[in-house]
Amino acid sequence: MKREITKLVADGLYREALCLYSQHHSLSLPPNKFTFPSLLKACGKLKAPVQGQMVHTHIIKTGFGIDIYTSTAITDMYLKLHRFEDALKVFTEIPEPNLASLNVAISGFLQNGYFNEALRVFTLVRDLGPSTVSIASVLSACESVKHGDQLHCLAVKLGVETEVYVGTSLVSMYCSCAELVSAAKVFQMVSDRNVVSYNAYISGLLRNGVPRVVLDVFKDMRGFSGEVPNSVTFISVISACSELHYLRFGRQVHGLVAKYNMGFDIMVGTALVDMYSKCGCWQWAYDIFNELNGSRNLITWNSMIVGMMSNGQSNNAIELFVQLESEGLEPDSATWNSMISGFSQLGRDVEAIIFFKRMQSAGVMPSMKSITSLLPACSALYALRCGKEIHGHTIRTDICRDEFISTALIDMYMKCGQSSWARKVFDQFETKTSDPAIWNALLSGYGRNGEYETAFKIFDQMVEEKVQPNSATFNIILSVCSHTGQVEKGWQVFRMMNRDYCLSPTHQHFNCMVDLLGRSGRLNEAWELLQKIPEPSASVFASLLGACRCHSDSKLGEEVAEKLLELEPKNPTPYVILSNIYAAQGRWKDLEMVRETMNDRKLKKHPGLSLIGVT
């Protein structure tokens, strides 16, 4: 009986093994301790919980439940059948569990994502002196550095922390917990580091946003360890080059890929396509894409489409999209999103909306990124109807309360002149968000639509609710002060930046204040403030010069024009504005001198332009 059932299970004939056992059981043939582990394995493979429970019942009746190997097999079967409570119950009832049963339970729980249960099993039998396999397995269950540190201490106590298997697992754990200093220390201590150790450390560094260190570790691997990189290594290193836009290093890595004959590995090839695209070399990316013909998957196609869009090659991206469909591949959400966001970023808003309509017709659900790419396109085209359709979709899919989506919706409604709709989106949050971005969208919209008093009220509400304004907030409110001529309010806001929020005014804030003072006729005050700006731009001088013309101040106008000409000697605007000031004051000789100077320098006034929209 033992050999027949065991052989059938070994040959993958699981149903036949169970049928044979049923026949033997009907004939009252006695089983032995080798019968049940094979039968339990068959139940697990067949995903047959009913048969598994029947076998378990027979085990209890025949008294084989106390056998360590049978109990371990029962635990393993229940884990494979996703009956985790039953598995844990059987395991805890094992009188004297050994390392084999420990490892079965831990690995079973981990494979099914039950990290806490795996840790619970580990703590139950820690006195057994767990093996390196046990420690390494349970390290992947650590969701906090606290648990990881405890296991690290146990590994040190057992003297296995430098063994490659445990050390590699410790490196992975510390990287997952963003403890890069600890990961580096453990990595340096690991004896006989292999390619798996390097891959664990390199991929962990990449996930934690330190691509430069990835390249340093790769150099160390190549220079001192003698380990040969594999496809996993190359994918991480190429991705680091992509993030850093290190074309030269990326090309060297490409050379190594060719040397080790990994150029036709689809994942390595896709990583190279992405790297060359991000480095601005779309032609090289396209060459690799063509070399992968026959093995390309949808990820490769999406990467190439994104690469074309990011390099301004939208027509090539459209051709690839059509070719993808002709080769029998179905564009997924990422493909459609690449087209929509690409067109939006290139300012081709009509095409972005057309592809959105096509995506809807294809029955593909738009992603969050698609929606946030489309809303600015609707704003640019004043396509209120399309914007409302997208808003309706966000309500139906219950993502309308996402702060990023809400900010884009507020911006779209404001740019379409629908401030009441924008306010409804903002007011859906009973507890106002602390993110200044959504407040800024509302403030900017009210300012753009001339609702200045409402903008001031929103800013006051923002301050009252202790939302931390950022630099953009102050830029918006200072611009509103400038358009309403509220000088004292402007000074109050300007001083508030540093005094209350420790924000240093930028060039834009100084420009707004100079513009505000200039518009209000406080030209000397504006000139004094301008002197305090470190390296003032030409635009701020041009703004003050325009104010000098409005208030017919030729003396200050001459000083400002001189400064502006130092920054932009080929710009005729300062001469034109000075001419207007002199003409308004009847200083015809000075006007003539300015015109002669313009002729001598071969400068001409820019002609005016008119634009007529035809519908």
Image: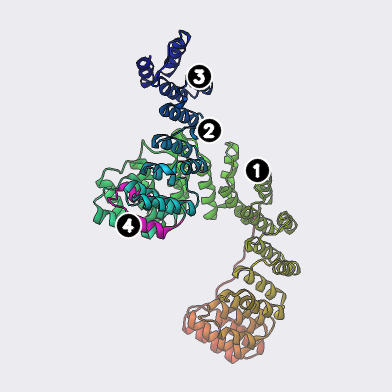
Residue at mark 2: 89
Cα separation, mark 1 vs mark 2, equals: 41 Å
Mark in the foreground, 1 or 3: 3
> Viewer-proximal residue, 36 or 11?
36
- Quick one: label 1, few (<14), some, or many (20+) residues within 10 Å? few
Query: Counting residues from the N terminus, which is met first, the one under dot 1 or under dot 4?
Result: 4
> Viewer-proximal residue, 334 or 236?
236
Secondary structure at numbered mark 2: helix
Residue pictured at 26% horizontal, 45% vertical: 260
Q: Are marks 4 and 2 in contact (CB under 8 Å)?
A: no
Q: Mark 2: which amino acid?
A: Lys
Mark in the foreground, 3 or 4: 3
Cα separation, mark 1 vs mark 4, equals: 49 Å
Mark in the foreground, 4 or 2: 2
Residue 100 lies within the magenta run: no
Specify start and end residues of the magenta stretch as a single range.
Answer: 178-200
Cα separation, mark 3 vs mark 2, equals: 18 Å
- Quick one: label 2, few (<14), some, or many (20+) residues within 10 Å? few
- Quick one: label 3, few (<14), some, or many (20+) residues within 10 Å? few
Residue at mark 3: 61
